[in-house]
Amino acid sequence: MILSSEAETLAFGAKLAALLRPGDCVALAGDLGAGKTTLARGVLSALGLEAEAPSPTFAIVQPYEPPETQIPVWHVDLYRLDDPEEARELGLDEARRDVAMLIEWPDRMGERLWDDVLRLELNVEPQKGGQPAARRLTAHVPPAWEDRWPPA
């Protein structure tokens, strides 16, 4: 799928939000500037967050709870982790049953990333004719998501 603008990325995030429930995890992969945080902001906005969601790069985990959002959500950014073992200290395994998770830089978890995660990869497409760069979104859909995918 091609997301040709920030608005389309936010709109896709809103569609994804309609599918999300506690216990779900969405892994957002891609280079710096690929649109991972923008997509997460679209999800969080559609779930009721009124303010613009900050990037959790420095906090690492940014939790949201009702009534701020319709369901509990953890927005996680693992960019600053140097070792997959550091992810254990964040309590992701324990929180996983009760919250929906949006995880940026999931590769930093190594083999610790769960098998039932919806993996979305964003890649910047080359610019054409002065147009803003589009994003190619590739989904790796596990069996746990097949009855909900693709978003309407």
Image (cartoon, rainbow, N blue to C red):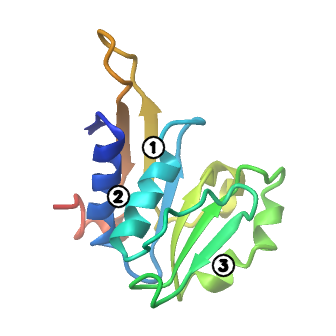
Q: Return the residue at label 2.
A: 13
Residue 32: image tag: none
Question: Marks 2 and 3: in contact by CB < 8 Å?
Answer: no
Question: Marks 1 and 3: in contact by CB < 8 Å?
Answer: no
Where is residue 42 drawn, in percent x and y? 38, 59
Question: Which residue: 61% across, 56% down?
Answer: 55
Where is residue 66 drawn, in percent x and y? 47, 90
Q: Return the residue at label 3.
A: 93
Bin the neighbour count of mark 2 within 10 Å (Cα to Cα): few under 14, some 14-19, many 20 and up. Answer: many
Q: Locate the C terminus and report the quarter of the image it occupies.
A: bottom left
Helix, strand or loop at disc 1?
Answer: strand
- Of residues 98 and 141, which is closer to you in this image? 98
- Of residues 92 and 114, which is closer to you in this image? 92
Is 44 above or below relative to 140?
A: below
Where is residue 21 drawn, in percent x and y? 38, 80
Amino acid found under the numbered disc labelled 1: Glu
